[in-house]
Image: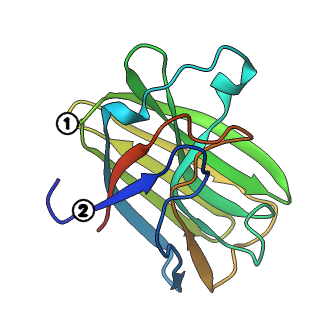
Amino acid sequence: MENCKKYLIKKGNHKASGLNFGLSISNRFRYKASFTKSCLYNFENDDKFDINKLCGVSTDLYHHNQSARIGWRSNGAGGIEILAYWYDDGVRYHEHLLHIDLEEEVGLEILCLDDKFYFTAKTLFDHVQHTVELNNKPCSVKYKLYPYFGGNQKAPNDISIFLKEI
């Protein structure tokens, strides 16, 4: 992908290296992403269902209270599962969006309007949308959320992800 940033999550870490923080007053967050072979892993326990975080936005001072993210995990078949992942009033939810192949470019969007989050994921051959109704209206000042590996497990190897804000 052209002009995209490579995020590296080192083995044994949760967060991508470098400074990953940004404030925003926008309601629309658009990205393009692709995943490398390094994103494949196989946990033999319930941790295989943990959702890694790719990108997103907190619409509250604390992202575990109200936020919208795009999540991902190795799908066990040599590809990546993309998920909508959000918190509403401190309760975590997720919804499957689509599966993609390694190196396949996926377009992603999170829209925060009124009392809803709108998630969109699209590839050359697939286009999925998911809408979430919230208990509270998102606040006007937001902070961006960047790649994070886990649940409770840390990266089993160096993880490289390409991500571009558009």
Viewer-closest of 48 and 157:
157
Crowd rating for badge 2 (residues with CA inside 10 Å; few <14, some 14–19, many 20+): some
Residue 157 image position (x, y, % from top left): 49, 37
Check the image and report above or below for 125 versus 158: above
Q: How many marks?
A: 2
Which residue is at 74% across, 75% downward?
60
In the rendered structure, which amino acid carries the disc numbered 1?
Leu
The residue pinned by badge 1 equals: 124
- Location of the C terminus by quadrant is bottom left
Q: Is 39 displayed left or right of 67 in the figure?
A: left
Check the image and report above or below for 63 versus 23: above
Q: How is the image coloured?
A: rainbow
Q: Is 82 displayed left or right of 92 in the figure?
A: left
Q: Secondary structure at mark 2?
A: loop
Q: Quadrant of residue 64?
A: bottom right
Check the image and report above or below for 158 versus 114: above
Which residue is at 61% across, 79% downward?
142
Which residue is at 66% across, 14% downward?
44
In the rendered structure, which amino acid carries the disc numbered 2?
Cys
Kindly check if marks 2 and 1 are in contact, taking CB atoms under 8 A apart as contact: no
Q: Is 42 displayed left or right of 29 in the figure?
A: right
Residue 25 image position (x, y, % from top left): 53, 86
Residue 21 image position (x, y, % from top left): 53, 77
Check the image and report above or below for 58 versus 44: below
- Judged by depth in the image, the label closer to the viewer, 2 or 1, is 2
Q: Secondary structure at mark 1?
A: loop
Crowd rating for badge 1 (residues with CA inside 10 Å; few <14, some 14–19, many 20+): few
Q: Earlier in the sequence, mark 2 or mark 1?
A: 2
Residue 5 image position (x, y, % from top left): 29, 63
Residue 85 circle label? none
Viewer-closest of 69 and 45:
45
Residue 4 circle label? 2
